[in-house]
Image: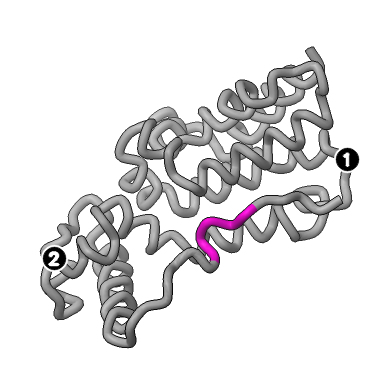
Amino acid sequence: MPEPLPIPVLGSDPVERCDAQRNRRRILAAARQLFGRDGVEHVSLDQIAAAAGVGKGTVFRRFGDRGGLLRAVLDDGETAFQEAFIRGPAPLGPGAPARERLLAFGPAMLAHVETHGELLRAAERSPAARMRHPVYATYRMHLMILLAEAAPGLDAAYAADALLAPMAADLCLYQLQVQGMSLEQLADGWRVLAGRLISA
């Protein structure tokens, strides 16, 4: 049975005027170029606005704040990852038992975080900002559905948050860059955690 999961980054933008669409494309292109050249932490909204040829107010009106802009830059990667676990091949996507899909999700999510870590860390300004975002809600709902099927006696809502907590970009980057852990170590640890949780 298909899962009723929305993809927040697809089709979520209202219809825009041509000049607004053009400004959006210019702002995102400028942000990607500057982030790639100077690093996310070293680029200001003023620099992005100047490079895009728009006023800083246009950036705020279109994206709300720095976190909103960062999330928009991340949209392509988020869309591809969500497509993979919602409609992609098993075991990450449909067609495998819930337990297998759950255990495939963690390593795939960690690889996603490693690839987009600097942008995600900057966008996740606080735990609250991360958890209030629609993308987090999609991950959480996906895990809740899998957990409810794999371990019916478990509190799926609590367990989903517990399994997503180690995916925070700040923690993952600390483990990878400071502690010297490998992506394989993180994935193995997450699978052990998830496996014990649903077997308890």
Magenta portion: prevailing SS class:
loop
- Residue 111 vs residue 53: left or right? right
Q: What x and y, as percent, mark residue 102?
A: 74, 37
Residue at the image point whose x is 11% and y is 72% from the top: 55
Q: Amino acid at mark 1?
A: Pro
200 w.r.t. 4: above or below: above
In this view, the residue in front, 177 or 31, is 31
Q: Quadrant of residue 49?
A: bottom left
Q: What x and y, as percent, mark residue 157?
A: 63, 26
Q: Which dot marks residue 97?
A: 1
Residue at the image point whose x is 60% and y is 62% from the top: 80
Q: Amino acid at mark 2?
A: Gly
The earlier-in-sequence mark between 1 and 2 is: 2
In this view, the residue in front, 176 or 72, is 72
Secondary structure beneath label 2: helix
Residue at the image point whose x is 83% and y is 31% from the top: 149
| Magenta highlight range | 6-10
Q: What x and y, as percent, mark residue 60?
A: 20, 61
In this view, the residue in front, 13 or 43, is 13
Task: Locate the C terminus by quadrant.
Answer: top right
Residue at the image point whose x is 39% and y is 62% from the top: 72
Q: Quadrant of residue 103?
A: top right
Which residue carries the number 2 mark? Answer: 57
Q: What x and y, as percent, mark residue 155?
A: 69, 19
Secondary structure beneath label 1: loop
What's the CA distance linking mark 1 and mark 2?
Answer: 49 Å
User: Does the magenta run of residues contain 187?
Assistant: no
Query: Callout 1 environment at 10 Å: few (<14), some (14 to 19), or many (20+)?
Result: some
Farthest bottom residue in view: 18
- Residue 153 vs residue 159: left or right? right
